[in-house]
Image (spheres, rainbow, N blue to C red):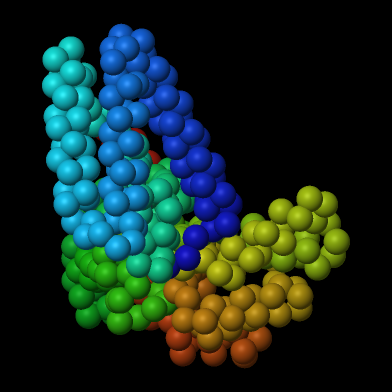
Amino acid sequence: MSFDPRHRREADRLLDAAQADRAARRAAFALQCRRRLPQLEALDRAIQGTVAQAVAAALQRGADPAQAVERARQENLSLQRQRLELLTGVGIDPQELENAPLCPICHDTRRHEGRPCQCVAQLCAAENLKELGRQLDLEGCDFDRFQLRWYDAGFDPRLGASPRELMASVLAVCRDYAQLFPRYPSKNLYLYGGTGLGKTLLSGCIAKAVAQGGHWTVYATAGALLGQYEAVKFNRDGDGSALEDTRRYERCDLLVLDDLGSEMTTPFVQSALYQLLNQRLLAGRATVISSNLDMDAARDRYVPQVASRLEGEFQELPFFGRDIRLLKKEERQARP
Ligand SMILES: [Zn+2]
């Protein structure tokens, strides 16, 4: 699992702010308590004193320190009890004065068992979803919203099944892929078929579900993605954001590349696409592509290195049926 450096920076910023806010509130509350209960400060000092006494006794040479340590411990317990009574007597929960960490798992170190802690991962996932939400209608990207009723239920002898049956299995693969990510048997999917068959919707559903699972997910249309590579190559990347984007395409856990084949396929684009796909495959990173091109058309359009990666490394998911936008329009027109 890796994070977008931008999401990680934002997560750290939010955690810093939350910790500072908590410390300030606690300090203000402690001050308030001391004003209300003037005995509290002396009591806290005395408790500290017994801790120091116990440490000093334990370090003393010669005499057996056990008795002195025990005396300090008893004194400490008695003072703690007095403090508890003092606070609860006026309805203050002593825990509110404790220096408890915001995250009980990592104690605010932000790492746990050699990895970034959940508190960081959750914030990164939220940033990831926010970013996907700027490109996709995330509310609509829900597998349950994929309606099979738009696909013909009649048996098609050329397909050996009905479009609806075939699309039901496409839907099942996409759902399993997202739910099992990154352990689905195929690491890469190639969704292809005509326009208006739901490829972008299912790609979006996968992107959202995988990001919700805490995996760094980047969505881009082929035109936008390759445009960023061109901007870097031809020095049109004034603020360095295109370079940052190309790194994200290369390093994210899941890249959802929508509408492959709609871009201007220049020799530079072919080479950039090959480098990207090859790099991701070698690093074992997952990619979901959607395209209007079937494999024959992809072979015609792309250089053999690109076409062979698509054919050899991606599970093909053909989409069937009629353009849903047209079907919806017909349905609206047919209403009285
Ligand atoms: Zn944590």
Q: Is residue 319 left or right of residue 144?
A: right
Q: Is residue 171 left or right of residue 240?
A: left
Task: Inspect this view and state whether residue 183 appears.
Answer: yes
**Residue plotted at (28% across, 34% down):** 47
Q: Is residue 176 left or right of residue 123?
A: left
Task: Inspect this view and state whether residue 260 appears.
Answer: no
163 over 277 or under it: above or below: above
Where is residue 138 drawn, in percent x and y? 39, 45
Where is residue 164 drawn, in percent x and y? 22, 64
211 over 335 or under it: above or below: below
307 over 227 or under it: above or below: below
Q: Residue furthest right?
A: 235
Using the image as rendered, state which of residue 267 and residue 180 is in the foreground: 180
**Residue plotted at (16% across, 24% down):** 82
Q: Residue furthest front?
A: 62
Where is residue 76 drawn, in percent x and y? 21, 37
In this rendering, the count of numbered labels is 0
Using the image as rendered, state which of residue 20 and residue 15 is in the foreground: 20
Residue 44 lies in quadrant: top left
**Residue plotted at (45% across, 74% down):** 286
Q: Split into 4 quadrants, where in the image is the N terminus?
A: bottom left
Using the image as rendered, state which of residue 230 and residue 265 is in the foreground: 230
Where is residue 133 drawn, in percent x and y? 46, 44
Q: Split into 4 quadrants, where in the image is the C terminus?
A: top left
**Residue plotted at (56% across, 49% down):** 9
Using the image as rendered, state which of residue 157 and residue 305 is in the foreground: 305
